[in-house]
Amino acid sequence: MISLKGKVALVTGAGRGIGKAISLMLAQSGCRLILAARTREQLEEVHREIRGRGGEALIVPTDLTRDEEIQRLIDTAQTWGAIDILINNAGWGKRAPVVKGNIDDWDRTFHVNLRAPMILAKQFLPNMIAKGDGAVINIGSVSGKTGEANGAAYAASKFGLIGFTQSLYEEVREYGIKVAVILPGYVNTPLIPPNRQINRSKMIQADDIAQAVHYVLTSPATCCPVEITVRPQRTPYR
Ligand SMILES: NC(=O)c1ccc[n+]([C@@H]2O[C@H](COP(=O)([O-])OP(=O)(O)OC[C@H]3O[C@@H](n4cnc5c(N)ncnc54)[C@H](OP(=O)(O)O)[C@@H]3O)[C@@H](O)[C@H]2O)c1
């Protein structure tokens, strides 16, 4: 996986924020991109940027809570042949105390953050195993290490994503497949609403997470950086 040129990468949540930064980095590195998220206009904008830089991409508007749309994404992706790199980046959550929690919201969180990554990995791994090369990178969160009030479903999904990553790594490491989870603290993306107490220029930037993904993908064949925590260098709190 040291050279990314010509690899086919699928990125979920590719329309904005961290997923957009990862997609642009991968295109810059020579990958052909399959971009998934719900909002077509955002995917089209990323597509335009990739094309403008001479890259190639396919957009597949997808709601990852819907099995038939996940299947359509898989079928469309496979028209490009095998997927070499799967980036499970899409994420969703709504803050609420458990006693006031909406069970449909919990299901949505688990589906986007954990169930869809597992389904996509299950579908794309057989080709990676056959090739003896490939990567599955999951975008977790520091909320996957420490729970907090009003964030139970999100934290539970991200704790689960770490368990999934560790288990998958053990299953496929002998095939030379990189499996990793990246755990960012607060990143300057639309997920974090404007807040007077936060200096956004001091937050982790989406490109910083893209760089961590690049590091995993280009790490030597003898090692796999299975878990990377990314924290802000300086406190962003005023
Ligand atoms: N920003 C942070 O501080 C931070 C910190 C730690 C971890 N993370 C994680 O990093 C990842 C990216 O977050 P971000 O900050 O870039 O958030 P963002 O700007 O809100 O982007 C989230 C992406 O996920 C997509 N998405 C959400 N629900 C979806 C669904 N049902 N089906 C398909 N796509 C869906 C969104 O597109 P549509 O809405 O168009 O579907 C969007 O492209 C997430 O997994 C998040 O949990 C973020």
Image (spheres, grey):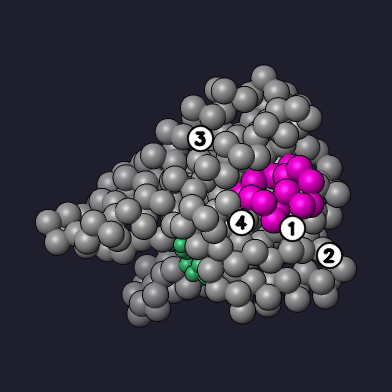
Q: Residue at x 60, y 74 (%)?
A: 40
Label 4 CA crowd tier, 10 Å (few <14, some 14–19, many 20+) = some
Determine whether the beta carbon of the residue marked 2 sits less than 8 angstroms from the nearest atom of ligand 1: no
Residue 237 vertical placement versus 112 (above, below): below
Q: Which residue is mark 2?
A: 55
Q: Which residue is mark 1?
A: 33
Earlier along the polypeptide chain: callout 4 or callout 3?
4
Label 2 residue SS: loop
Earlier along the polypeptide chain: callout 3 or callout 2?
2
Residue 169 vertical placement versus 47 (above, below): above
Q: Position of residue 155 (x, y in %)?
A: 33, 48
Mark identifier at residue 165:
3
Q: Disc 2 vs disc 4: which is toward the camera?
A: 4
Q: Which residues are magenta?
A: 74-87
Label 1 residue SS: strand
Q: Position of residue 234 (x, y in %)?
A: 47, 60
Of the residues shown, which amino acid type is indicated by label 2? Gly
Q: CA distance from mark 4 to mark 3?
A: 24 Å
Q: CA distance from mark 4 to mark 1?
A: 16 Å
Q: Residue at x 44, y 37 (%)?
A: 162
Residue 82 covered by magenta stretch: yes
Q: Which residue is mark 4?
A: 72
Is residue 32 left or right of 15 when viewed as pictured? right
Earlier along the polypeptide chain: callout 4 or callout 1?
1
> Seen from this angle, which residue lies furthest front?
68
Check contact, mark 2 vs mark 1: CB within 8 A: yes
